């Protein structure tokens, strides 16, 4: 059978969320029979694999792939899904989240009509603790129009200069498979920041459309995500991803935008909570040094009346100075439980975005 869209879903220990996730596909207005679903189990240790196998036995258009090696991020499972897909158009869905009922139809019809390489829409935020209340993310690009058709990224330089709903995520988009194959656009196999790396390649190489008037995706906030754990592996993998992003931009002669430089704010706050050895911390900070230098040169330490931003700037200044001072500050940060204060402020801010 010929499918209109392939939806790729990496699975890892998602037994409690998979059914809600797949239900959103079953209810799509485009009709579920027109969607090819590829579920890639990344070595789950719970009953996820058995659960998705039941779905693939029940529905002919659901394909299950079980990986024998865990990659620690959804990047390579998604690459496998792209290679295994049979339709002309690709979409991604994370196991914790779900589509609104008309998302597939809306994006499919739009990409066929506009003949672009990919289309991006807006999304809602939901807390795990309160799934009834939805929040939206600030969108500084809406001033350019409700529907933006862009032939080249230089037409909208603000795209990667500020945080917006289109810049980083891969799951609020639909892509031409031929475009991804032609430009060899893939996720990194074993590095993090994989969504940003993939999306950056798409924006630099493609013609695209930004929908500032349509919400299609619901992103469920999960504070227990592995990318929020300051282990040695996670911290190294993030720097690995940043390095790939910086090298790609260098090869394309594209200036490092502020949004990408600002990834070091996120990395810094993870590092502040680490329990690693002195030598490991020192090695990580040596690796991070070029990114801190780029942050200071490209992003600048901005003045902002927001206490949250001021706190971030203060930490960046410390980590941009020298390694030993940074490691000492980690101890102070943990001893006085500054992390709990910051987290309360950060998540209060995040969940109160209008």
Image (cartoon, grey):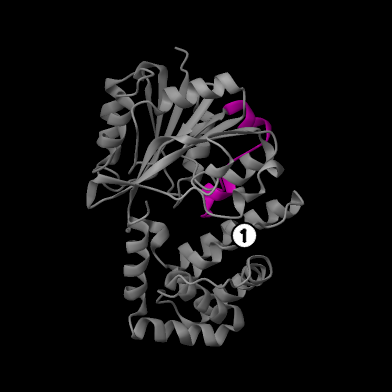
The answer to which of 312 and 7 lies nearer the viewer is: 312
Q: In the picture provided, is 22 more to the left or to the right than 267?
A: left
The answer to whether residue 199 is above or below residue 34 is below
Q: Is 250 in the magenta?
A: no
Residue found 50% across the figure and 41% down from its top: 170
- Locate the N terminus by quadrant: top left
Q: Answer with left or right where residue 16 lies relative to residue 265.
A: left
Q: Please tell me which residue is depicted at 63% across the width and 54% down the height of the picture.
A: 245
Residue 7 location (% of width, % of height): 43, 30
With respect to residue 96, does 318 lie above or below? below
Task: Residue at the far top: name it.
Answer: 1
Q: Is residue 280 visible?
A: no
Camera-nearest residue between 8 and 51: 8
- Give coordinates of residue 307: x percent, y percent: 43, 73
**Mark 1 lies on residue:** 258
Residue drawn at x 74%, y 55% as measured from the top left = 250
Q: Magenta segment range?
A: 177-198
Picture mark count: 1
Q: Is residue 314 above or below residue 107?
A: below
Q: Is residue 4 left or right of residue 129?
A: right
Badge 1 element:
helix
Question: Horizontal and vertical percent for residue 122?
Answer: 45, 39
């Amino acid at each position: 059978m010929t499918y209109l869209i392939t939806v790729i879903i990496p699975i890892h220990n998602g037994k409690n969320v998979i059914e809600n996730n797949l239900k959103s596909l079953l209810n799509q207005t485009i009709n579920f029979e027109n969607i090819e679903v590829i579920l890639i189990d990344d070595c789950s240790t719970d009953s996820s694999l058995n659960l998705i196998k039941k779905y693939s036995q029940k529905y002919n258009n659901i394909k299950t792939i079980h990986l024998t090696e865990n990659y620690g991020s959804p990047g390579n499972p998604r690459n496998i899904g792209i290679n295994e897909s049979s339709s002309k158009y690709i979409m991604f869905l994370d196991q914790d989240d779900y589509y609104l009922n008309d998302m597939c139809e809306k994006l499919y019809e739009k990409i066929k009509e506009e003949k672009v390489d990919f289309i991006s829409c807006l999304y809602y935020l939901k807390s795990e603790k309160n799934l009834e209340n939805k929040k939206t993310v600030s969108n500084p690009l809406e001033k350019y129009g409700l529907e933006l058709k862009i032939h080249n990224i230089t037409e909208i330089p603000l795209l990667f200069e500020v945080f917006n709903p289109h810049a980083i995520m891969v799951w609020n988009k639909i892509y031409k498979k031929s475009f991804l194959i032609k430009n060899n656009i893939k996720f990194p196999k074993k590095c993090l920041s994989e969504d940003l790396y993939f999306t950056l390649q798409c924006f630099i190489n493609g013609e695209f459309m930004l929908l500032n008037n349509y919400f299609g995706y619901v992103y469920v906030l999960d504070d227990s995500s592995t990318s929020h754990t300051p282990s040695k592996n996670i911290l190294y993998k993030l720097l690995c991803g940043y390095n790939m992003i910086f090298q790609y931009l260098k090869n394309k002669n594209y200036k490092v935008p502020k949004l990408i430089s600002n990834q070091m704010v996120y990395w810094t706050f993870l590092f502040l909570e680490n329990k690693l050895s002195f030598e490991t911390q020192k090695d990580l900070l040596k690796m991070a040094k070029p990114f801190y230098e780029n942050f200071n040169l490209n992003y600048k330490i901005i003045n902002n009346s927001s206490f949250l931003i001021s706190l971030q700037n203060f930490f960046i200044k410390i980590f941009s100075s020298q390694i030993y001072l940074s490691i000492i500050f980690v101890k102070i940060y943990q001893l006085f439980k500054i992390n709990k204060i910051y987290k309360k402020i950060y998540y209060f801010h995040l969940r109160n975005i209008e």
